[in-house]
Amino acid sequence: MNLSFSHPEALILIPLWGAAAWLFPKARLLKPLRLAVGLLWMLAWMAPHLPLQSRGLDLWVLVDRSDSARDLIEPRLPEMQTLLEQSRNREDRLIFVDFAEDVIQRDPLTATVLSGFTDSTRLATALHFTLDRIAPRRHTRLLLLSDGYSTEPLEEAGLRLLRENIPLDLRAFTPLDAVDYRVESINAPLRVRPGEPFLIEAHITGTRDGDIPVQLRRNGEHLAEGIVTLVRGRGRIRWPQRLDHPGAAEYEVSIHPEEDTWPGNNRQRHWVEAGGGRRVLLVSAYEDDPLARLLRDRGMEVALVTRTATLRPGHLSGVASVILNNVSAFQVPGPFLEAIPFFVREQGGGFIMVGGKAGFGSGGYFQSAVDELLPVSMELKQEHRKLAAAVAIVMDRSGSMNAGVPGAPGATKMSLANEGAAQAIDLLGDMDAVTVFAVDTQPHLMVPLTTLGGNRSDIAAAVRRIQSSGGGIYVYEGLKAGWEELQKAQQGQRHIILFSDASDSERPQGYERIVDEMLRENATLSVIALGTENDRHGDLLKEIAARGQGRILFNADAAQLPMIFAQETVALSRSAFLQEPVGLQPMSGWSEIAAAPLPWPAHIDGYNLSYLRPGAAVSLLTADEYEAPLLAHWTRGLGRVAAVSFPLGGEASDTVRAWPAYGDFVRTLVDWTLRRELPGGLALRQTREGEHLRIDLHHDESWEAVFALAPPELHTVSAADPDPRAHAWRRMSPGRFTTQIPLRGQDRLRGALKAGEGAIPFGPVSAPVGAEWEFDPAMPRALQQLSRLSQGVNRLDLATVWDAPRRITLRSIRSPLLILLLLAFLTEAALVRLDGQRPSLDLRRPVRRAPAPKPPRPAHGTPEPPEPEPSPARRRAFQQARHRNRLP
């Protein structure tokens, strides 16, 4: 056994111990137990280590999932995984780590998915992540599967790898003789005035000279094309542009070379914002919306959008107020709805929702992104329900529902659908009834038709336990079973919610007969489809919903399923929109909007049933038993929000449109919501510098007193960071503040400067194609050097990694030595104490004995006999007593 010592200088104790034993013999340091204490003390000081070798090997495989490496690695990955798994020994362990922007340890028992961005290669982060998780007493190697290009420096992670003595093996995937062309950058302003001309300038680079076709698009539409001639690997092209109306436009420059190894860097995007004043964005269900005419007559610029699928967050740029006029939440893209709260609270914009059959709760806005923004709530209170409902939920539990969901760790499509159905059950009333079927190749009755009452929690728990099975969903079987169970219901309203995978819905033959029978008996049907309308069975599900005179809700994000189930449950209730004349009760809230009162009409033709939120002001109530708010408003952050819970156009709006004060009412309400204009003397300048956005705030002396009381605030949001984030300013000089904001990949950044009681909005701003596509040649060389220093190798044959020499690990034995030292010391102390308690002679005090009889005196002249010598035993006892009592 070869021991190693951390402190061999402790051997000095041996001569010191011998010298102490010779100088102090009475200490008896050479006694066996005391000598053992000394030796243990010396060994513990020397910190000995035993060499140990682990029988098994822990191989951590780091798989590069970034955009630049995906096409090179993923086609070969299953074969490599199988090879590594089959060639390992029983004691060996194989662990996979996937990384790009984020890092995740792959769990073989669950369907883990690497979420987040894949446009960067965070190799250093992946190394730290792995080193934090290795077992300290097992032999470990790292195997990197990558193209070798990291987008972050490796110095710190490399030093830690060497310090912990972990070998890093490489399997590099780099195409030979790579030919690469890319759009290096776009030079254009971030903000212009409407009608102001500007240039879009694109810089193109490549590994070979030649002619490269180039295209320019704006908001997805083709604008121009041209040819760039590369000389010494570089070229550029320019296009003159102008934005005639306020708003934001996304320009995209793309190249189309005949040969290109990495096409991922063949395009760049750039946003240009055209600032506006009193522009109103009207999203409407009506091609000829009367609100647009009224507002234009007032001198406002109105952008009317009826093709709601085209809406994007960029439409909010240059807008002072947004109106949603009887448009269903299911028709409006999610990113646009999610952008409205920041537009109102931080950017100071206005927001108005107008009622109708597609507005408020009946339009699916319950629990939507704008729900909490509105001054009214849309839940259905039990005392206000017109009819009890019986609902059949027919759920897809096919094999595809067992897949994982990006952004929801540990969740599957099935578990999220279960949660959505459970939330739908929670929203129904005590007098409502529900039945639930889980369908694969045949229907399985999970919950028979049951009136909720006190059964709600048990039913919801049963639904949450539904498990995915094999095969696809047989649509006809599911609808047939749901309708047969629903026919037993006594409730006045009956409805089926069909939930199905848009790419895995089978055997629909005969569904028409079931749906037609439902319609004859006044039952309704709606479809929630997981996927898009372009999926394999998207058209089938649209046909089913159309034949059932219900709506079809496509959603590709399974994480949104609970919200969609909740929205559909509220929307299906016929009491959410009451189409019957109702009288009005004017309230005092109108005085907060306008100084002059309005002559309100005597009644309206219908309204959306909702409830006033605490803190909101109300200008108009219904005169029925509900006393529901018809016009409510409040301030949210820097913006103003109004809810008009009755139609202003289309069906059930004849009485309102004939009202003489109709135009004044609309113009005054919209005027109140418009973003407040800031005084002069303030300017915001944006400059994109690589992957950062620099914001410069310039102000004159008039703002000094304002900023002394309340400093300027800067907030931003993006898809990756949807919660508003505050940024700190640096005061560069009197009248100038500056800050820098990182830009991530192709994510779009929107922001707002709060100054006093107003705001200056800006954005969207996107980053150029980042370091993921730069391919710095120094990075693979640095990675190879790090592998050699860590005693790693290039693994062309991955199976040989299990034959790599095992690392000898040193295990300290200081702890057991210290335990033995303590035991020996305590034993010696105990023996000394016990030895001191034995009876002994104390020669310093005389021993009292009974006087011995005097011998007879001898005759006169006779000599006395000599005194007898003490016995050997008595002499030894005397010597021991003398030594013990330290007699002189």
Image (tube, rainbow, N blue to C red):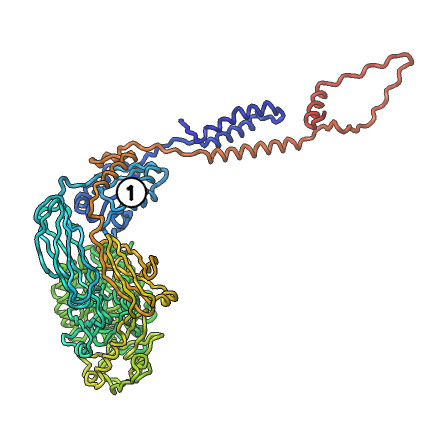
Residue 449 locus on image (x, y percent): 26, 69
**Residue 1 falls left or right of residue 86:** right
Can the viewer see residue 499 in this picture? no
Most extreme residue toward the right is 860
x and y, in percent, of residue 809 in the image:
36, 33
Front position in the image: 376 or 491 = 376
Mark 1 surroundings within 10 Å by alpha-carbon count, few (fewer than 14), some (14 through 19), many (20 or more):
some
Return the residue nearer the eye: 19 or 213.
213
Image vertical order of residue 670 relative to residue 127, above or below: below
Which residue is the site of mark 1? 154
- Report the front residue among 732 and 673: 732
Identify whether 371 is placed above or below 251: below
Q: Residue at x 10, y 53 (%)?
A: 214
Give the percent coordinates (x, y) of residue 223.
10, 60
Relative to 352, 14 lies left or right: right
Q: What element does badge 1 sit on?
A: loop
The residue depicted at 90 percent of the width and 12 percent of the height is 861
Can you say which quadrant of the picture contains the N terminus?
top left
Q: Is 376 placed above or below 186 here?
A: below
Q: Quadrant of the C terminus?
A: top right
Q: Residue at x 27, y 50 (%)?
A: 102
Is residue 670 depicted above or below 116 in this figure? Answer: below
Residue 463's image quarter? bottom left
Residue 837: percent from left, percent from top: 66, 33
Q: Is residue 49 among the parts visible in the rendering?
A: yes
Taking 788 as reference, is 253 left or right?
left
Q: Disc 1 marks which amino acid?
A: Leu
Place residue 633 in its image quadrant: bottom left
